[in-house]
Amino acid sequence: MLRSQVQDMAHEALVRTYVVWLRDPEKRDRNPLPYARETANNLANDAYDKLAEPADEAGLQECERVFVARPSRASDLHGDYAGLVPHTPLDPLEELVIPAIRRMKRSQRRDVAEMRSQGMEDQAIAERMKREPARIQTLMTKAAAELREDEQIQLHIRDRHRKTRRREEDTGE
């Protein structure tokens, strides 16, 4: 049953991605796979949220063994899962955010974003950069806005979470 649900979600994600890519000519020259992956992830989260009762411990352990833990050989998989290639979940920080930070032009914004991605707090960043903590917060806010504009990160932002500028809302642009 789990396998058929996963296949249905993957199919639905691909169909939704295909529809969006046909509708939006700007997306046609981009790679649709990150969008499809995010769509599949959202569908899985939605399906989980709708569960009447949580999965039992044995079912969760099997899911972890198959989909999270990477066996040394595909032949280590058995039963319904023998044809599947396990996938380690996407790490957004390593695979999306850090490369996007590296694409930013060299600036204090980029420096603050790099230090925050390494887990540093605002106070430690302020001391290192010899700036006020309020200035660090301002730089991080501007860096976050710049990162949201990155093409690869745009693919992973749900429509309802997209930021709009006030003047665009007010003027109808």
Image (cartoon, rainbow, N blue to C red):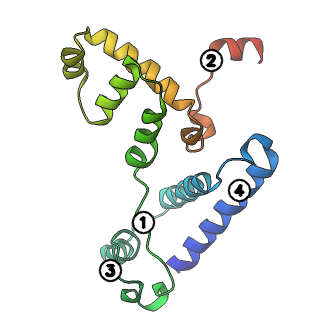
Q: Along the line of sight, which residue is nearer the eye, 110 or 3?
A: 110
Quadrant holding the C terminus? top right
Q: Of tags 4 and 1, which is closer to the observer?
A: 4
Amino acid type at circle 1 is Glu
Residue ranking furthest to the front: 106
SS class of the residue under badge 3? loop
Amino acid type at circle 3 is Ser
SS class of the residue under badge 4? helix
Q: Which quadrant of the figure has residue 123?
A: top left
Q: Which quadrant of the figure has residue 76?
A: bottom left
Pointer 4 or 1: first along the chain? 4
Residue 32 percent across, percent down from the top left: 65, 54
Q: CA distance from mark 3 to mark 2?
A: 49 Å
Q: CA distance from mark 4 to mark 3?
A: 33 Å
What residue is at 38 percent from the left and 47 percent from the top? 94
What residue is at 71 percent from the left and 56 percent from the top? 16
Mark 4 Cα shell of 10 Å, populated few (<14), some (14-19), many (≥20)? some
Residue wearing tag 2: 165
SS class of the residue under badge 2? loop
Residue wearing tag 4: 16
